Image (cartoon, rainbow, N blue to C red):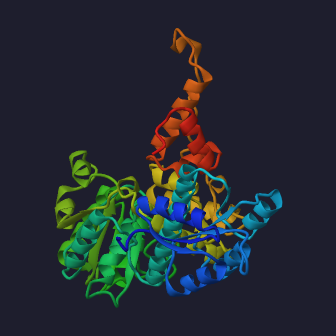
Amino acid sequence: MNDTQPHILLIDDEKIALTNLSHVLEREGYRITACMDGESGLQAMEKSAFDLVLTDLRMPGIDGMEVLKHIKTTTPDVPVIMITGHATLDSAVDAMKAGAYHYIAKPFRLAEAREVVRGALELRKIRNENNELKERIDHLAGQATIITQDLAMQRLLETGKQIAETDASVVIHGESGTGKELLARYIHDNSQRADKAFLAFNCGALHEEIAASELFGHEKGAFTGALNTKIGLFEAADGGTLFLDEVAELPLLMQVKLLRVLQERELMRVGSVNPIDIDVRIIAASNRDLKQAVDDGKMRDDLFFRLNVVTLSLPPLRERRDDIPLLAYYLLRKYSVMMGRDVQEISTEAMQRLVEYDYPGNIRELSNFIERGVALTQDNTLDVQHLPQSLGAFTVKVFKPEMAATPTTLQEQEVEHILNVLKMTDGNRTQAARMLGIDRVSLWRKLKKLGIDTK
């Protein structure tokens, strides 16, 4: 038996029921440990780790409710399925309130039991993945790093670390919200300038005269309102790194002044004729194609060649979807702390919506979604209703008479709708059931009734 397969504990005082269920689940490839009473079941849990427990409700000595309560106290992430030959509404309610994943009554169909077990193990897998994400986020907390598990991003960071060791000018290209400033900080933090200042300036934010004052500084009396001498960002960043965001938005006259500073490694404050030596590394960024900006006459070609020693292109978030869960949980932790909330989880459907969205605003937009969700959440789970309605709410196709000569039957429409939802979830029946508003077992029954493959 493969140790990577899920390990299931079965507890039932009826030997025939225990043997039959063990054989069925073993044929599914699961590792099975079978016990005939609650006491031996709890002893087995002390010796081994289990991914799922199925326990009979009524047993002599330690019964199923006691087993359930013990598991919820010691290993709360392990789902528990209750089995009983004495099904009553009260016992079902009590079991679910105590934290049972599901409740099935004897005699049950083995195919139904298999489906319930698969659903419980999928839940266990999701919980494990969430815990792993949280551990990684806790490890990353306080580190000046970019959160990613995407291979293309990891290669980009390796390149960034290599060029950080030099003083080469860098151009970072990427859509708005992809984290260009964060990548610039990453390069600075991995350079020999890391103990010096990292300063950022948005080149399109200010009027030309104010931009000159901000970058190069000014002398007292240089212009109306210049009551004191002021050093600019170049001087303030001396020995460190200056990040120039949206560099193509600088007016052409300012581009001339910037080019001279880069070439001569000296500047003159506004209103001064005395040059000041500087030692600053420049990292520029743009959401535009700088070569196209040169061709369009928006950027000087000599400045472009001076800056464009190394170019790094940040991919948009829609091209690194594997990073979305990791980023989502990182942002969830961040905003929960900022708002003093105890939001710890993101529901499966909410995460699916987040992963499927295309993010024209990239990481900045994801950040806004999570911040909004934390603000609206009343318990410890961010759910789909806490996200904007624009996030991938699926639509049901409505039959229009003009689309067909013969109207489809209700059963045909139900089959089509279920198949569409299964396609949206890549065959994940747990997620499909949630989107359809039914439980997994009900979905299985519908699939069988409608003649859809239930394997």
Determine if residue 270 is in view.
no
In front here: 318 or 349? 349
Q: Is residue 133 left or right of residue 105?
A: left
Is 335 located above or below residue 399 in the figure? below
Q: Is residue 432 above or below residue 314?
A: above
Q: Position of residue 251 (x, y in %)?
A: 34, 57
Residue at the (26%, 68%) spot, across then down: 156
Front one among 275 and 343: 343
Q: Quadrant of the C terminus?
A: top left
Residue 187: percent from left, percent from top? 30, 77
Position of residue 323 measured from the top left corner of the image (x, y, whole percent): 41, 63
Q: Quadrant of residue 304?
A: bottom left
The quadrant of the picture occupied by the N terminus is bottom left
Q: Residue at x 29, y 71 (%)?
A: 283
- Left or right of residue 46, residue 383 in this image: right
Establish if 82 lies above or below 263.
above
Q: Which image quadrant for residue 113?
A: bottom right
The residue positioned 54% from the left and 38% from the top of the image is: 447
Residue 266 position (above or below residue 171): below
Q: Residue furthest front?
A: 16
Looking at the image, the residue that sits furthest to the right is 90
